[in-house]
Image (cartoon, rainbow, N blue to C red):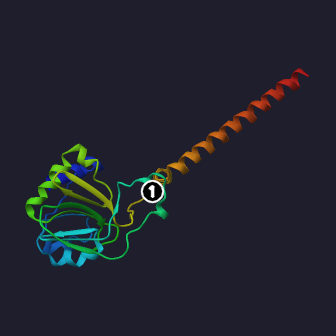
Amino acid sequence: MLTTLGKLAAHTGSPGLRLSLLPASRLKEAANSDLLIIHGGEQNALLQTWGLDMPALLQQGKRSFAPLTQVQNALYDWFGWQENRPLPVTGHAILSGDGALASITGLESPLEAGRSIVMLNATQPEALSLIGVALNDSARVDRIRGDLAFMRGEQVESFRVQEPYYVGQLPWWSWLWFHLHRHPLLLALAGISLGLLLTLMAFATLKRITQRRLGHHG
C-alpha cells in the first residue's frame, strides 16, 4: 500500500495525506472519496456486485474480465482515431487456472460519479508482491498503461477495456491542449496552418511597407 501511495504521489505531485483505512465491509462509508482497494483474491460480496462494471476481477482459482483491447497496439492512439478504435463487446469471460497473477485496475467509482478507484488485485495474497516489484522497476512501469495491467512473473501486459472518463475542470487553453495532444495529425495541421497564416500576414505587412517607400520615392 505504501509503495503504491508513494508512486501515486510521485506521478500526481500530491502526497497521500488524510487517509482512512477501512475494511471491505465498510467500503460504502467512503463513497464520496477516491479509493485505493487492495484485494488478495478472497471472496467479497461487494466486489462481486461490481464485477460486471470492472475491467477485471481476480479471485483464487479464477479470473473474470471483459474482452480486452490491448493498449500496446498504439496506432489508434497515435493518429487520434478514437472513434474507429475496436471497442470491447459487452460481456465478461471467466477463466479458471492456477498460478500467481496480479493486476492494477483503474475505473470510475460505482459508488459515486466523478470519483476514482485504483484497485490492486491478485489471485492470492502472495501475488500482490508482483505489483510492488513492477512499480519499483522502471522498465515495467513504462508498460503499465490503460485501465488494466496484468503482472505475471516478469511480464507486464496492459489493456484498455473501458472508455475514458474525466473529472475536474481545466482552463480553456489547458483543455484545448489536452484534447489536441491526443490527435497528433490534427495538431500538426493546426501548427502548419498557423505558420502559413503568420507567414502571409508578415508578407502582406512587408508588401505594404515596400509600397509606401516606393510611393514616397515616386
Q: Secondary structure at mark 1?
A: helix
How far across and how far down the image is residue 161, in percent?
34, 65
Residue 200 lies in quadrant: top right
How far across and how far down the image is residue 18, in percent?
19, 58
How far across and how far down the image is residue 20, in percent?
16, 63
Q: Residue at x 83, y 24 (%)?
A: 213
User: Residue farthest to the top?
Assistant: 217
How far across and how far down the image is residue 79, in percent?
49, 53
Frontmost residue, 198 versus 84? 84
In the image, 89: left or right of 175? Answer: left
Frontmost residue, 4 versus 15? 4
User: Residue farthest to the front?
Assistant: 97
Frontmost residue, 41 versus 23? 41
At label 1, the amino acid type is Tyr
Give the answer, above or below, for where 110 lies relative to 171: below
Q: Residue at x 21, y 61 (%)?
A: 103
Residue 216 lies in quadrant: top right
User: Residue farthest to the left?
Assistant: 126
- Residue tagged 1: 76
Give the answer, above or below, for where 102 lies relative to 215: below
